[in-house]
Structure formats: structure tokens, C-alpha cells
Image (cartoon, rainbow, N blue to C red):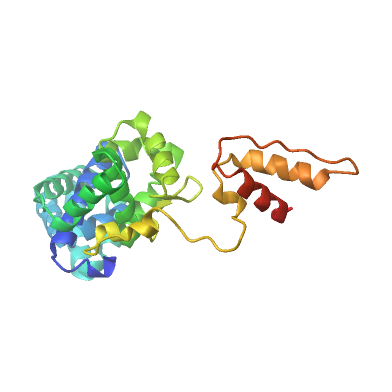
Amino acid sequence: MQDKAHTIHSPEILYVRHKVAQWLLAVLGKGAAMDSNFFECLGWALGGLGELMEGVRKESAALRSASGREACEAVQMLLASTPKHRLWRVCDDLIDDHPCMKDIFLERIGGLLRAMPEAPCPLFRQAQSRLETVFGLDADSAALCEFTFLLQSFQQIESYFEDSLKVFHFTGRPLLAHMLELPQADLSRRLDELVGFGILEDGYGHSFRVPETVQPVWSQENPDSSRLFSRPLEGECLPLDSFRLAPEEVRHVRRLMDSRGEEPLHILLYGTSGTGKSSFARSLAKAC
């Protein structure tokens, strides 16, 4: 499901557009700037900006002030000279040049987004069910996974919410929580848990991705459980990063091994049978 399909009115695309419409309403409510990235994403969600601009033209024509008449003329010139698929590039300049247009844009955009009908989609309903039954996620964590999947599947969505608004950055997470109607205090904890479970991959706190093994959750195919919950390891010794140990502890032990002199070095590994002490010792010996 890639963004090249955005012109197809399939149940999946209609569902995603409605989702994006709700997110755009949420960020507008928090005072997000209406820049070119916003209008590009808006145009994708609405299937074009022609209806918006025509509405803006009609409302600006009713303005009686000199600035209003100038704004109306500017809109008419843009509609006459700009291809419809390029309108997103000029809307923010129009608002900057004619501040009286800002409220008109806000009102028209809000009306169009709120008027978008809900679009139930069996594929996404099935994906949510899989996230809940296969991974044991609640509805909030499943919504976070769905948002991440849609960002990496549709370029316009990713460009605005991740690149422009930076919703995965620490400072942008309150906005993300507002968009998804999640408790703000739980958002970072949920992201950490999803990464720990292997359901999401962490891009150093600035971005998150659904790994390839989990993406079939959003397809007609049944996910391969052997790939979801395990991965093949080659060789007699496991990589050190495959053990559930704090990275700083592993680095400390390696520093001890690398700095040993003439005196023998003793390292005590403790734990119940079957927890991986011998495997870790072999891996440590090979790594050092």
C-alpha cells in the first residue's frame, strides 16, 4: 500500500484519508502553521485543493475592504495560472501576502475536513484485531502502530507529520498524543515497550518504523509467526547484542577483558539454569 495509489478511491485509501483529515484538524486546533507542507498533506487528504480554493475565492469576493478585493484578485489569478496539482505550493504565500485570508482558509479547511465521511475498512479492522490478539496490544498501542505504518507507507503523510512537525521528537510528542487522543504521560512508555517487543524499530528517538516482519499485519496474508517472534542466528556463538543485558554492563565487561594484564581475570556469571550463562561466556570469549 504505497502513496502511488492515492488517486484510487479504494476502501483503504478512503480510510487513510479520513484518518489524516482527523489528524490535520487536531494540529490546526493546536495552532500549527499552514505552510506548504501542510497544504501538500491537506491536498492529498482531500484529493486536491480545487474545491478549497474555489470556496476561498467566493468568500473573498464578499469582502468589502480594499485588502479583501486585492486578496480576491490574487486568488483568481492563482486559479487561472496554477495547475491544480500545484496549488499546495502557493497557498501559504497567498496567506502571507494577504493576512485577511487566514480566517477564510481556516474556516473552509475545517469545514471540508469535518465533512469527510468515515470510511470503515476491513483490512485495517483486521490489522487492529491482529495487533490485539497476536501481540496483546490495547487499542492505544495499536493506534500508535497504525500511525507509524501509515507514515512509512505514504510520503505526503511522512513529510508533514514526521519531517515538518517532528511528532516523534521529544518536543513533538505532546502534539502526537493530542492527534491520537492518547494520554501524553503514557506515550513515551508505549513507544519504548513497542520497540522492546520488536513491533517498532527506533530511529534514535527521531523516527520509528514498523519492521518488515510485522508489516504483513496490514496485508491480506497471515503473518509468519516464526518471523514475528524469532529470528535466525548463525554460528556457534550468539552476537553479544542478542542477550538481554544492559549494553553498559556488556561494555564494562569487555573493557575488563581488553585491559587485563598478567594477573588472571575472574568474572562471575550467576543465574538459574538455562538463562544463557554459558552461551554468553562463549560469545564474550569470541568477541574479545
- Residue 146 seen: yes
The image quadrant of residue 151 is bottom left
The image quadrant of residue 51 is bottom left
Q: Position of residue 49 (x, y in %)?
A: 19, 60
At 46% across and 58% down in the image, what residue appears? 231
At 16% across and 55% down in the image, what residue appears? 15
Q: Position of residue 172 (x, y in %)?
A: 40, 40
Q: Nearer the viewer, residue 66 or 114?
A: 114
Location of the N terminus by quadrant is bottom left
User: Image check: 114 left or right of 216?
Assistant: left
User: Image check: 217 left or right of 109?
Assistant: right
User: Image check: 188 left or right of 283?
Assistant: left
Q: Nearer the viewer, residue 180 or 43?
A: 180
User: Image check: 158 left or right of 234?
Assistant: left
Q: Nearer the viewer, residue 175 or 99?
A: 175
Question: Is 97 rendered above or below residue 76?
Answer: above
The image quadrant of residue 80 is bottom left
At 20% across and 67% down in the image, what residue appears? 84
Tell which residue pokes out farthest to the right in this image. Answer: 262
Tell which residue pokes out farthest to the front in this image. Answer: 273
